Amino acid sequence: MSKQDKHDTTADSVAEENRLIAERREKLNGIRAERNAYPNDFRPNSFAADLHERFANDDTETLAQVDEIFAVAGRMMAKRVMGKIAFVKVQDGTGSIQFVVQRDNLSEGLYQQFKQWDIGDIIGGSGVIFRTQKGELSVKPSELRLLSKSLRPLPEKFHGLTDTETRYRQRYVDLIMNEQSRKVFHVRSKMIRYIRDFMEAPGREFLEVETPMMHPIPGGATARPFVTHHNALDLTMYLRVAPELYLKRLIVGGLDRVYEINRNFRNEGVSTRHNPEFTMLEFYWAYANFEDLMDLTEDMLRGLALEVTGGTKVEFEGKEIDFGARFERISVENAVRKYSPELADADLWDAATLRAECKAREVHTEDSWGEGKLLMELFDATVEHLLLNPVFITSYPTEVSPLSRRNDDNPLVTDRFELFVAGREIANGFSELNDPEDQAERFREQVSQKDAGDMEAMHFDADYIRALEYGMPPTAGEGIGIDRLVMLLTDSPSIRDVLLFPYMRPEA
RNA sequence: GGGCCAUUAGCUCAAUUGGCAGAGCAGUAGACUCUUAAUCUAUUGGUUCUAGGUUCGAGUCCUAGAUGGCCCA
C-alpha cells in the first residue's frame, strides 16, 4: 500500500479534493516521511498582543538590550520570501506578529523546508525581538517549526471571506480571516462575564444555578417546543422553551435570588432575529417587584454599554441609541394611543374596535382572541418598530401574561413590562404570580386554548402548582435575550452574526 | 408560507444581443537579505448550484428543485 493510499480519506471528502489540496497533501506526505508531522511539544511563551503592548514604545536600540527568547505559535497568514530573508505574519489568539525568517539564522536546510510551507500552516518559532528597518516589531526565529500542515487554501488575503453562507457554515474560516468576527465573540464573552459579575456583586448576590434542559412538561413561555424521546424510560421529553418554572421552584425552596444564563429552544421560524436555540439570562428575585427589575435592568444595560463601548451612546444600524438617559416607562395602552391618538380609552378594551383596527392594518386575528391579545397585536403593528431608545412598556394584558401577577387596581393587566431597544424586544419581566389558585386557573385557560388548537399555549404543570401551594414569597423575575443584546452592542444586523454556529439547513 | 435577488476557478469578482469562460490573489517553477495586498518572469487551474427544456449554439432564455440574502406574513 502506498503512502498515498494510507492517508486517503473517504469517498465523500475525496469528491471535494482539488488540485490545491492534493499538492498540499503531497507536501504532508513528504513531511510524514521525515518526522512526526503533527508534533505537540512546542510551547509558546508569548502572545502577539502582549509583545506589541510590552514593546510598543521601544526603539531598535532598546530592543537590542532585551535578553530574552520569545516563543510564538500561530497560523501563517502571509509569507513574503525575498531570497534569503522572508517576512511572515503569524496570527495567534490575541493578534498577529511578524517573524523575520533569515536563512543564515536557522539550522542547515531548515530555510529550504520553510519555503515549502504554505499560508495557513500552523508554525512555531522562537528568537529575539527586534524592529525591522521599516520599524515593525518582529521576532527573528532561530528555531522554527511546522506544527500543523494546513491542507486547504485560505480565502484570498485582501478581500478575505465575505460570502455570508460560508462565513456561517464554516465559522472556523470566518474566524481565521475576519478580525471583526473575532471581535464580536470577544465582546459577547465580555458581556456575559460582566453580567455574571453584576448579578453576583455585593448587594445583589444572585446565585447562579442550572436547571433542566429537557422537560417532561414544557412551560415558562408561550412557544412551541422541540420534542424528543427518552428511550430507556420511553418518555416524551421537550427541550425547554424557558427555565422559568424551575427557577421559581427554587424561589419556593428558599434560594431567594437565582439566575441562569443558558440556552432556550423554540420550534419556530428562523430570521435575522430568531434562532431555534438562543441564550437567555433569566433571574428571580424574592421580595422585589417589577419596578425593582426595571431599575436593575437599566443599571445593567447602562453598565454593559459602558463596559463594551466605553460610552452610553451606542451606534446601531446608523442610529444612535442612548443608554445613558433614564429609560422611558409607558404602559401598553398609552403607547398604543400615543401612536394612534384617534383611539379612545374605551376602544382599547373593546374587541370589535380592536379587531377592526387590526383589520385596517392587515393584521391577522383569530376569533378566539380576547381584548388583551388583540391589543398586543395592535401594539406590535403600530408601536414596536418605532421604539428606538430603551423603553419599558408596562401593564401587559393578563390574557397574554399567564405567569404574571395581576395589577392590584386593574385585574385586566399585570405588573409586567417588556424592554424594547431599536424596535426589538430585549427583556421581559414581571412581578410573579404566586397565588397558587390564580395560577391553576390561568393554566386551565391555557389548556383550553391548547385544546382549541393553539400550539404555543401552555400545559398544566401540577408540580409547579404544588410548589406554589407550599408558598412562594412575593417575587419578581425577568428574562433578557443575550443574543439580541450582543447584536445591539456590536452593531450586528443578524442574530447569526453573534452566534458562533447559527442554525443552517444541511448543505446540499 | 409569499415576493424579489444571488449562486461562474480555493477566495474576490468579470463575461456586450444567446456566439472561443476571463482577471486579480492563492498555487506551481524561477529571481531577490527589509517586506507590509512585496516586486519581476513564466505557468497550472472550470460539473458556470442541480435536473430537465428551447436553440445550429446556453454562464446568459424557459421549467422545476437546492442553498443563501433581503423584504413581507
Image (cartoon, rainbow, N blue to C red):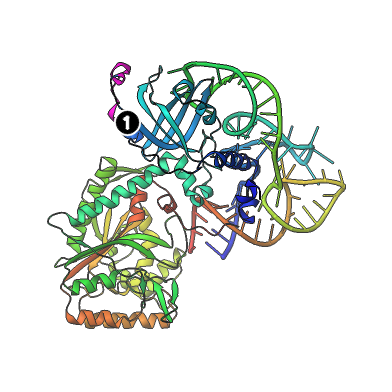
Q: Residue at x 20, y 53 (%)?
A: A198
Which stretch is magenta?
A: A52-64
Does the magenta segment cover residue A492? no
In the rendered image, the vertical position of residue A258 relative to residue A406, given as above or below: above
Q: Is residue A443 visible to us here?
A: yes
Kind of residue sitting beneath label 1:
Leu
Question: What residue is disc 1 on?
Answer: A51
- In x, y percent, where is residue A61? 30, 16
Q: Quadrant of the C terminus of chain A?
A: bottom right
- Nearest the camera: B57 or B62? B57
In the rendered image, the vertical position of residue A5 relative to residue A65, given as above or below: below
- Nearest the camera: A440 or A129? A129
Does the magenta segment cover residue A61? yes
In the rendered image, the vertical position of residue A42 relative to residue A246, given as above or below: above
Q: Main secondary structure of the magenta part?
A: helix
- In x, y percent, where is residue A416? 25, 66
